[in-house]
Image (spheres, rainbow, N blue to C red):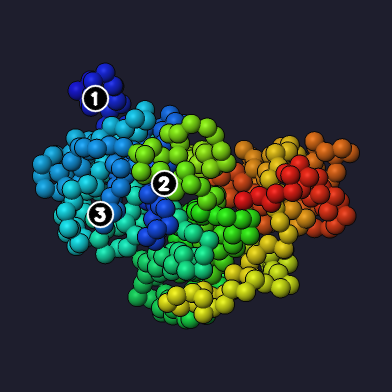
């Protein structure tokens, strides 16, 4: 019993070192991308899923979380800890109007422009990990110049918010590229193979990561170590202020491009639509999820929260995949959009996003189906997106990348079937991307049903 702690009146806690470590999520985006609003609404959604959530405002240039929640006088947070006014970060928590959600405010940090020294960083990280929480969300600054601590480099799940414009996508690519370079330097720094790989990444128009790794095939141990590090890289993407299905597809294209050229899986968690309510959330002091009514964005925030919490439960599952070569036939466009390399400020992307755009619009559906693998294994699935060339499904059972089989649409008249190949297996989410392999007339007919039931509105 002497190991049992009571941190709040009437709240019992399990002994130290007895509970699982908290899930640490760092949310970042360029200035104006809406990352703070995204972080606030995700924190609310996770707290409503019965998780104890602590939201830390680490954006020292523009701390706004207390404004978003309508907290006029927050408890002195980061400043109090760094200036030894409090001994623990628990003493710096500000209660919000949301049950299970607490805020560590960055207010009153003054004109601090330099990163914390090593001792302060170590102390802050210790206090973050000692917080009594299931999920810790860090609202990270737009630039690294004023970061107290680099959560991206210290094991946090990296979530980047990007608008669907070339400049934002280029900056997102470069941010992930910077951290991929760090991973490679950590694993293979100082070796000839590591230097060769880094030189390939530094080229203005690098080859895909698959080809770069093949160039160091002579050292299988180095290649295996680098591949393992890239597989364990935790990166996620959220599109914000999306106005159309074309812009949503642009975010999907960015995810696929980064996967090919950086060798890491960076799934798009969702695309938040342009919303006047969401854009002006900080002024009434009530984030979107604290308002009345349920719209698509509200449902999407809860869906993203479930994905992130489900990702925690499957942390040992594979996070990366190598897309089969046959998938190129399904993502290349005959006439790619006019996205020139010159449009990207500060340097080009490694390839045109037009090469990664989908050929056909996707339509949101909610159908039951069966995925029957070539070996005979049958898996119940939920089909939530359809197009003429493929489908997106989710399942609680694992489906491996590269598997082939048949997708049966149980809810449609005649239960049509389509031969499919698995081109994207995101096991932590239970979500799988399928490409149709033949039976084009059936695919067109099923897509027409999806279009009609979606009201002819492509899915965002």
Vertical side of 399 occupied by 1: above or below: above
Q: Which residue is mark 2?
A: 280
Q: Quadrant of residue 288?
A: top left
Residue farthest top in this picture: 10
Task: Please state which of the two labelled residues, at mark 2 or mark 1, is closer to the viewer.
Answer: 2
Left or right: where 410 falls relative to 343 = right
Answer with mark 3 or mark 1, whichever residue precedes in sequence: 1
Between the C-alphas of marks 2 and 3, the distance is: 21 Å
Q: Which residue is mark 3?
A: 60
Vertical side of 144 occupied by 386: above or below: above
> Which is more toward the observer, 419 or 292?
292
Q: Is residue 91 visible?
A: yes
Answer with mark 2 or mark 3, whichever residue precedes in sequence: 3
Task: Please state which of the two labelled residues, at mark 3 or mark 1, is closer to the viewer.
Answer: 3
Seen at 30% across and 42% down, the residue is: 67
For the N terminus, the quadrant is top left
Are discs 2 and 1 less than 8 Å apart at CB? no
Q: Which residue is mark 1?
A: 8
Give the secondary structure at mark 1.
strand
Q: Is residue 378 visible?
A: no
Seen at 78% across and 45% down, the residue is: 452
> Which is more toward the observer, 293 or 413?
293
Categorize mark 3 by other alpha carbons within 10 Å: few (<14), some (14-19), many (20+).
many
Residue farthest left in this picture: 84
Give the secondary structure at mark 3.
loop
Seen at 23% across and 20% down, the residue is: 9
């Amino acid at each position: 019993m002497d190991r049992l702690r009571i941190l709040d009146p009437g709240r019992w806690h399990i002994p130290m070192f007895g509970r699982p470590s908290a899930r640490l999520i760092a949310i970042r985006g360029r200035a104006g991308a809406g990352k703070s609003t995204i972080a606030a609404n995700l924190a609310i959604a996770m707290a409503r899923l019965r998780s104890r959530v602590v939201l830390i405002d680490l954006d020292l240039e523009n701390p706004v979380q207390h404004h978003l929640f309508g907290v006029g006088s927050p408890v002195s947070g980061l400043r109090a800890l760094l200036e030894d006014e409090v001994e623990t970060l628990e003493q710096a928590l500000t209660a919000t109007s949301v049950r299970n959600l607490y805020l560590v405010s960055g207010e009153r940090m003054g004109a601090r422009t330099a990163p914390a020294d090593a001792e302060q960083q170590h102390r802050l990280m210790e206090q973050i990990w000692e917080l009594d929480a299931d999920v810790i969300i860090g609202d990270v600054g737009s630039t690294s110049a004023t970061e107290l601590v680099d959560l991206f480099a210290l094991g946090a799940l990296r979530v980047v918010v990007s608008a669907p414009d070339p400049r934002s996508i280029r900056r997102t690519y470069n941010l992930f590229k910077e951290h991929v370079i760090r991973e490679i330097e950590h694993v293979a720094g100082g070796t000839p193979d590591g230097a060769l790989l880094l030189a390939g990444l530094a080229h203005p128009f690098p080859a895909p990561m698959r080809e770069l790794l093949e160039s160091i095939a002579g050292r299988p141990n180095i290649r295996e170590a680098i591949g393992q590090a890239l597989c364990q890289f935790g990166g996620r993407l959220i599109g914000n202020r999306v106005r159309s299905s074309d812009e949503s597809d642009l975010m999907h294209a960015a995810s696929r491009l980064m996967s090919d050229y950086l060798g890491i899986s960076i799934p798009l968690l969702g695309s938040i639509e342009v919303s006047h309510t969401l854009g002006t959330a900080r002024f009434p002091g009530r984030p979107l999820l604290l308002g009345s009514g349920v719209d698509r964005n509200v449902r999407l925030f809860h869906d993203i929260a479930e994905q992130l919490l489900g990702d925690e439960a499957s942390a040992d599952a594979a996070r990366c995949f190598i897309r089969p070569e046959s998938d190129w036939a399904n993502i290349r466009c005959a006439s790619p959009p006019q996205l020139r390399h010159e449009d990207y400020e500060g340097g080009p992307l490694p390839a045109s996003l037009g090469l990664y755009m989908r050929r056909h619009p996707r339509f949101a559906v909610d159908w039951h189906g069966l995925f029957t693998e070539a070996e005979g294994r049958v898996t119940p699935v939920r089909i939530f997106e359809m197009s003429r060339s493929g489908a997106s499904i989710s399942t609680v059972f694992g489906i491996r990348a590269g598997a082939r089989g048949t997708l049966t649409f149980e809810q449609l008249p005649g239960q049509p079937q389509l031969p499919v190949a698995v081109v994207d297996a995101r096991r932590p989410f239970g979500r799988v991307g399928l490409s149709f392999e033949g039976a084009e007339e059936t695919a067109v007919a099923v897509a027409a049903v999806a279009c009609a039931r979606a009201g002819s509105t492509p899915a965002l």
